[in-house]
Each structure stands twice: as C-alpha cells, then as structure tokens.
Image (cartoon, rainbow, N blue to C red):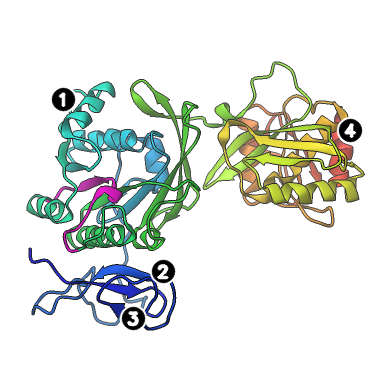
Amino acid sequence: MAKEKTVYTCTDCGGTAPRWMGQCPHCQAWNTLVESVAESAAPGRNRFAALAKAAPVATLADIEASEVERTPTAIGELDRVLGGGIVEGGVVLIGGDPGIGKSTLLLQALDGLQRAGVSTLYVTGEESGAQVALRSRRLGLDHSQVQVLAETQLEKILATLGARPPAVAVIDSIQTVYSEQLTSAPGSVAQVRECAAHLTRFAKSGGTAVVLVGHVTKEGTLAGPRVLEHMVDTVLYFEGDTHSSFRLVRAIKNRFGAVNEIGVFAMTERGLKGVSNPSAIFLSQHTEPVPGSCVLVTLEGTRPMLVEIQALVDSGGPSPRRLSVGLDRDRLAMLLAVLHRHAGVACMDQDVFVNAVGGVRISEPAADLAVMLAITSSLRGKPLPKGFLAFGEVGLAGEVRPAPRGQERLKEAAKLGFSVAVVPKANAPKKGGREYEGLTIHAVERIDEAMNVVRGLA
C-alpha cells in the first residue's frame, strides 16, 4: 500500500500545515495542530467513503424498519448490558483499569460464541498468541477454537479480516494498533482516531461486529480522542476495585439498548461469572440493625437493585469534613442543609462520612431520603428497624419527590423479604397486591414526616 501524504490540521480553524508547529499559522492558536492523512488524489479512492450505500430520500413512514437481530454471547450479564447480545455490524468500545478483567471477559464471550457456531477472531496487540492460549487454559476453556491474530499494524489486520470475515472480532487494544499512513506513535490521538475510523467502516460495510478494548486515563475516562466514543455504537465501562472480587460493567452509550444498564460479575479462578442476584453483594451481613445504616432501592438501567447506605457522624473540629464514597459530595452538603432547616437535625459541628457499600456508584437523586435517614440514625445512635428501606428525592423546600419506576422498586424489596418502606406519596401503590405482601409502605410528602415515621417505628 502506497504511503499517503500526512498533514497537520488545526482543530480550531481547520487550517493545515505541512509540518507540526506549536502555533497554527492561520488562527494563531497554540497546540491545536494534529496529524492527519491528506485525501488521496488517485481516481477511485476515497478514505472517507460512506459507511453504507446511498439511498433515495424517503419519509419515515415509508421506510421499512425491523428489529435488529442479536447474537447471545452465552454470558447473561454481558448480554443484558449489550441490550440482548451482539448486533451485526455493531461497534462496541469497552474500557477499564488495567487488570480489571476486560480481556478475560471478552475471551470467555468469544469462546461461547464459537461453541455456538459463530465465527470469531481475537486480535491481540499486547500479548503473544501463546500468552492468550495460556490464559484460555487457566479459564478452563479447553480445546477452544477461537482464532487468534497477534498483530498491531492496521493494514494487516484489515487484510486478515477482509480475507475471511468473522462474525465477531475483538481488537485488544485499539491503543496498540497503528497505521503506516501516519508517522506518529501508536496510542497517539491521530493513530487511535484513524484506526478506529477504518475498523468502524469495515464493520458497517461488511457486517462484522467489532469490539474495541480501550485504555483509561488516571481520571478513569477512555484514553484518546473524545470523538472515539461518538464513532462507536456502544460504550461499556468496567467498574470496581481490583482488590475486590466483584466487577460492574456499565453501558454509558448504547444505540441498541438501554443506557446505564449494568452487569454484575464475580471474579473466580475460572474467570468472570455473572451474579444473578446482585442485591446480595451490596447489602450488609449484620445480624442485628446498626446505627447509620439504611437500605436504598436504586435503579440501574432497567434493574432495581438494593444497596446499603452507611453514614458515620462524629464530632469534628472547627472545619468539619464532608466525605462521600459512591455518592455526589456536593449533593451531600445540600442534604445536610435541608436536614437542618426542615427536620431540625443539625450537623454543623460534626464530621459526616457517607458510603455506598460494595463499590457501587449512585448518581440518581432517589438516594436522598436514604442518605438523610442514615445520617440521622448515626447522629442519634439509634438503628433503623430491621427490614427497613427508603427511597425518594428530597428538594430544597423539604418536599419528598417521587422516584421513577417506584412500583418496580417496591416489588423488588418485597421479593427480598423487606417489611417496612418509607417512600414518596406519589410512589405508594393505590391498592395492595400479592407482589407487596409482607411489606408495610409508609407514604410521606415531606422530610419531617419521614422523620416522624421513623421515630414511631423505633
């Protein structure tokens, strides 16, 4: 393949320069020149070919639409995050900390697909074929027929994919792949963007599902250009502490399924295993209720999940600390102000620490009520009743606002044997049913009402 001419394009004004310079010669902006490939002048060649054939203009009512077919990976939790399975021609980007289990999960998924008769290819740029084979034996994938290619050059990878197109291909990782059309090192912004664009174009034109493994930065975001997340169909993030055996896979973008859907896995000697009842790992194992603990029913994608919220209130100095793990710290400060103003619970001279058990991160405001009840329980040294749970958003005026899909949350709590629930009035069921059997529901409209209910239960 003839080497194409490279130029440097300004990300601000779009101007080009024949070589890299610190300042753009057109708009005078600093550090905005990025290496790119100049469009070839050869007839019949176009780097920016369309992903699909051109179609005539038509109205939405006239276009025939059908549900996309999905291929299950034989890993139920991964299929849940993907929206039901792998989609033909779909591009998935999965990122996470080193050693958290990205390669392990994908190797298990490819083996399950291969055993189901789906052709697969595992392209490794960080390990040799022998290392991948050794890992497969550790995972118990004996006699696996997954094809492996140890290569980092984009042109050779595309040639292999084009010669025998597999149904599913994994690129591990996109930061190790480089194109000869660019002179920059693998992992640079230009290389990652260019290689991902070529692989995406191949997936869309040929129907091969491509899974890209991406590295993450110190801040936990995917390394490389942000445009990479816009190019792909699905973005998955691995979450969890490497020192813990549990892992969460969260979908932050999915064109074929629900966003914020999570899959819960446990790391074992034989690889990652799906956890069918994730609420069990986020709930305490206390034999008796303890002060500062309150169970919350949170919603992760389409799945209601029970999580224990723990709070510790202790005497502080002249500058009391406010620390939260798994919850928004700024929202914690707001809730303490509402607690003081509308419920008469003062924590001005107290250190307040709040934690979501199990390493889960909760971003929805429905955790407000559970956090405030846990703080009050810790401050007064009185535990909440056994089998107690709460959820609901709390406003600055002290009102308790409804949480989305409250009926499903209550059904999940009743199924797991909880007996008392304090919920927003709008989330209380109109009439009881078998699905709420054994669960006493207290509907409240304000935070002071919730405090009175808890005092009455004590």
Q: Nearer the viewer, mark 4 or mark 2?
A: 2
Residue that label 1 marks: 143
Q: Nearer the viewer, mark 1 or mark 4?
A: 1
- The answer to whether one can see residue 355 in this image is yes
Residue that label 2 marks: 31
Q: Secondary structure at mark 3?
A: loop
Question: Residue 199 in the image: x percent, y percent?
Answer: 23, 57
Left or right of 19, for residue 32: right
Q: Residue at x 42, y 45 (%)?
A: 81
**Structural crowding at the residue carrying mark 3, measured as other residues with C-alpha within 10 Å and reported as few (<14), some (14–19) or many (≥20):** some
Question: Residue 44 in the image: x percent, y percent?
Answer: 9, 77
Q: Residue at x 28, y 50 (%)?
A: 174
Q: Residue 15, labelled with which disc?
A: 3
Q: Nearer the viewer, mark 1 or mark 2?
A: 2
Residue 128 occupies which quadrant of the picture?
A: top left
Q: Are marks 1 and 2 in contact (CB under 8 Å)?
A: no
Which residue occupies the foreground of this view, 54 or 232? Answer: 232
Question: Residue 240 in the image: x percent, y percent?
Answer: 50, 35
Q: Amino acid at mark 1?
A: His
How far apart are the two marked residues, 3 and 1, measured between alpha carbons?
54 Å
Mark 3 or mark 4, earlier in chain: 3
How far apart are the two marked residues, 1 and 2, measured between alpha carbons?
51 Å
Q: Amino acid at mark 3?
A: Gly
Query: Is residue 23 within the magenta segment?
Result: no
